[in-house]
Image: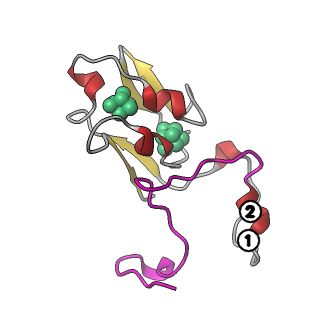
Amino acid sequence: MVLQPGYGIASGTPHLEPHSGPCQMCPELPCIGACPSGALRPIPLEQVRIGIARLDPARCIAFHGQDCHVCLDVCPLPGKAIAIEAGRPAILDARCTGCGVCSFACVAQPTAIRIEKL
Ligand code: SF4
Ligand code: SF4
């Protein structure tokens, strides 16, 4: 167990590092059944709230004249959690699970999407 300053009572519990490995939002969410303590409640995939994606227009190439929608293509909830509006991505806060797949797949270096804690 690694204690992490700044995480409060969550220190030492599992956490995601989206830049190196996001939650893949696997069908049926097998992590819930695998958890030995029952700490993960069985809920529909669309109700998962790990965090929330935040887009930085300064880094996103779609805001600078290039055609890109990789983040939309990889999102487990395309059109619900993220959409393309006038050629640019927009995070739809109410449905974003915070899985981090978009952040991991973003073609910008560094990524134009970070996952914010709820
Ligand atoms: S917008 Fe990003 S963080 Fe939110 S559900 Fe889609 S891939 Fe996951
Ligand atoms: S993948 Fe990254 S650079 Fe491409 S549109 Fe999405 S946020 Fe912008």
Q: Which mark is residue 32?
A: 2
Measured from the top left, where is residue 93 in percent x and y? 47, 39
Measured from the top left, where is residue 3 in percent x and y? 43, 85
Q: Please tell me whether mark 1 sits on a helix, a strand or a loop.
A: loop
Report the amino acid beneath label 1.
Answer: Cys
Measured from the top left, where is residue 33 in percent x and y? 79, 64
Q: Is the Cβ of the residue at disc 2 closer than 8 Å to that at disc 1?
A: yes
Q: In the image, is the residue at mark 1 within 8 Å of ligand 1 by its beta carbon?
A: no
Judge whether residue 61 is colored magenta. Answer: no
Q: Is residue 110 left or right of residue 17?
A: left
In the depicted structure, whether residue 43 falls above or below residue 93 = below
Measured from the top left, where is residue 34 in percent x and y? 76, 67
**Residue at figure coordinates x 69%, y 46% from the top left:** 45
Report the amino acid beneath label 2.
Answer: Ile
- Front residue of 50 and 4: 4
The residue wearing badge 1 is 35
Q: Which residues are magenta?
A: 1-29
**Residue at figure coordinates x 74%, y 47% from the top left:** 44
Instruction: Say whether residue 94 is visible.
Output: no
**Residue at figure coordinates x 29%, y 23% from the top left:** 62
Judge whether residue 20 is colored magenta. Answer: yes
